[in-house]
Image (tube, rainbow, N blue to C red):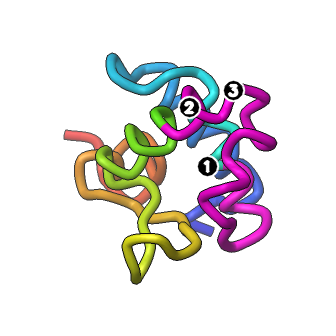
Amino acid sequence: SLFELDTLARRLRTYVDRSETLKPEAARLLEEALVRGEFARGDSSRITGLPERTARRVLDEVITAGLLASTTPKGAVSLRFPAEALEIIFPRLFSET
């Protein structure tokens, strides 16, 4: 229950909204990874609705932020939770100080 998985998509969107570097379309990529488990890098344009080059840039930004990653340089990407995002993505895991 501490993970509150039923509202995880909303918290991922909140993280993107608060980010100074991520574009709003990044939330769509994160939600796709949450629902499907992983997706091919080439699907980023379809998922975001952006032109291919722009979608690749958004995907690269999300990967650089540590929210998506893959085991190979060209492999499918899946969701990750970098330490700096945990307070927003999983707020109940941290007690308020």
Residue wearing tag 1: 30
Look at the numbered discs 1 and 3 and tell me whether their residues touch, using CB distance below 8 Å: no
By secondary structure, the bulk of the magenta-drawn segment is best described as helix
On the image, the x and y values in percent for residue 83 come to 24, 57
Alpha carbon of mark 3 to alpha carbon of mark 2: how far? 6 Å
Alpha carbon of mark 1 to alpha carbon of mark 2: how far? 18 Å
Q: Amino acid at mark 1?
A: Leu
Front residue of 92/65: it is 65
Q: Amino acid at mark 2?
A: Arg
Figure quadrant of residue 42 = bottom right
Q: Give the quarter of the figure containing the C terminus.
A: top left
Decide whether residue 87 is among the magenta residues.
no
Secondary structure beneath dot 2 equals helix
Front residue of 82/45: it is 45
Secondary structure beneath dot 1 equals helix
| Identity of the residue furthest to the bottom in this view | 71
Q: Residue at x 43, y 26 (%)?
A: 22
Q: Which mark is residue 51?
A: 3
On the image, the x and y values in percent for residue 73 come to 38, 72
Decide whether residue 47 is among the magenta residues.
yes
Q: Is residue 17 above or below residue 76?
A: above
- Between circles 1 and 2, the one closer to the viewer is 2
Locate residue 43 relative to residue 82 in the image: left or right: right
On the image, the x and y values in percent for residue 19 come to 38, 23
- Between circles 1 and 3, the one closer to the viewer is 3
Magenta part of the chain? 31-56
Residue wearing tag 2: 53
Q: Is residue 65 above or below residue 67?
A: above
